Image (cartoon, rainbow, N blue to C red):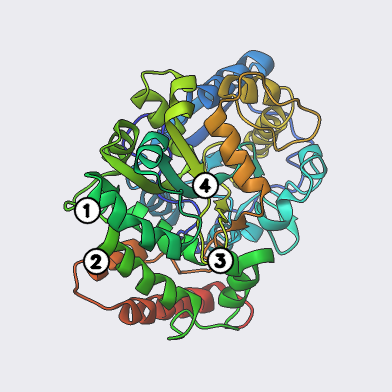
Amino acid sequence: MRITRTITAAVAVGTVLFAVSGCSASSDSEDAAAADSITIWHNAADNDGIKALYDGFTEATGIEVELEPIPADGFESTVTTKWATGDRPDILEYHPTSSALALLNAGENMQDLSDMDFVDASGTLYDNAGSLNGKVYAAITGFPSIFGLYYNKTVFDEAGLEVPQTFDDLLAVCPDLQAAGVDAFHESGGSQWPTQITPFLYGADANVGNELGTALAHNEVAVNDPDGVVVKGLETYLEVRDACFQDNYATGTFENAVTEVYSGNAAMTVIHSDTYDIWQDAAGGDEELLSETVGFTGLSTETARAAFGPGPLGSYMAPKTGDAGKEAAALKFIEYATGEGYGPLIEANKAFPVIDGYDVPEGISGLKQEFKDAYDSGATIGYPTDVTGFGDNFAADISRMLAGEITAQELADATQANVERASKAAGIEGW
């Protein structure tokens, strides 16, 4: 993303990767003497707590860390382009989705982390993330990204309106908000990636237990079914455009969405919880004031259900490099990040722990608690998260759909073709 502390493109959208073969690693990397340095490809949007984790690892182990920052803009394409050349880091910070792991060919290219202590200490987290074909290849240290509706509390109070919980509610409330002199919904077409979130939220109610995502991933349900959730979500999104968006929605940015909603010039926007630091900056760093001003809720077809996705920030894989010493040092980093360094990490970030044995830090803000409440209230994993190829051109095609160049059905047809191609190439069951 565009501001130092924020995350990159939506984590739950089934990022497109390229399946390539890597070097074979020595099978005894855990027994090898650890090298004295490792290279980490990391997202330039890493927050201060994560940056401190890298320094803490060196202090604790003496192993130097060479950070190779990947710009948050174009993060996925930059990583996959480098990866496709055969270049490998010792640690890769990246999306821990099964679709990402499949197309990075994790079974061949990543060290198996299944027997490390953090796996059993993370409850059921690795049932839905960080794993592929029953093996864990990514260590997740961050609380999931929660996707939902941010809203200005004062705007709704002064207008005497209830915050929408469903898409019907959303469409009903927008005219009244516009009549009150505010933009009902600030969309970020200029940033492009946020435009995917609203259609995905439409499917949150349909994805309990990842039922929809699994069916799409294994060719049991077609993305382009005219009566299916994907097409209906896109068609409803166009209704939201017509009833709710600000005039400059095609060029609006998510940074502007934050400032417009915080200031009360706009009533709502849809985005994810990892933009929290931008909201905090809008409030001048005052978390209490932020929580008094801005609220967060889920939004779907029948209930106020949020969506979630495992985020790339603080999610780590250990690629096989063929250097047993480097591989051993990489495992030591993951041990540190999920062990000795984990407590300081969640304390620094005032974050909810995902590994057992750690207390919730004091000072969690009201808005962060609303993220947690939305997650605990039945949030479902974003349905495209594990659908291989879904994200290929999806955001760009939404821009074309918003501009009237293609229909919702045509967008879904193109996405179905991408899913079929990528899934067959990756050997996904059902294709």
Per the image, label 2 sits on a secondary structure element best described as helix
Q: Are marks 1 and 3 in contact (CB under 8 Å)?
A: no
Q: Which mark is residue 276?
A: none
At 56% across and 66% down in the image, what residue appears? 302
Residue type, numbered disc 4: Thr
Q: Residues within 10 Å of mark 2 (few under 14, many from 20)?
A: many
Q: Nearer the viewer, mark 3 or mark 2?
A: 3
Residue 185 at x, y = what percent?
31, 50
Q: Quadrant of residue 102?
A: bottom right
Residue type, numbered disc 2: Leu
Residue type, numbered disc 3: Glu
Query: Which residue lies under the disc numbered 3?
Result: 302
Per the image, label 4 sits on a secondary structure element best described as strand
Query: Which residue lies under the disc numbered 4?
Result: 297
Answer with mark 4 or mark 2, whichever residue precedes in sequence: 4
Query: What is the CA distance from the residue labelled 1 to the residue labelled 4?
Result: 22 Å
Q: Are marks 3 and 2 in contact (CB under 8 Å)?
A: no
Q: Is residue 205 above or below residue 377?
A: below
Question: On the picture, is 84 further left or further right than 360?
Answer: left
Q: Quadrant of residue 63?
A: top right
Query: What is the CA distance from the residue labelled 3 to the residue labelled 4?
Result: 14 Å
Q: Are marks 2 and 1 in contact (CB under 8 Å)?
A: yes
At 69% across and 65% down in the image, what residue appears? 209
Query: Which residue lies under the disc numbered 2?
Result: 402
Question: On the picture, is 84 further left or further right than 175?
Answer: right
Residue 402 at x, y = what percent?
24, 66
Pick the front one: 139 or 376? 376
Query: Which residue lies under the disc numbered 1?
Result: 249
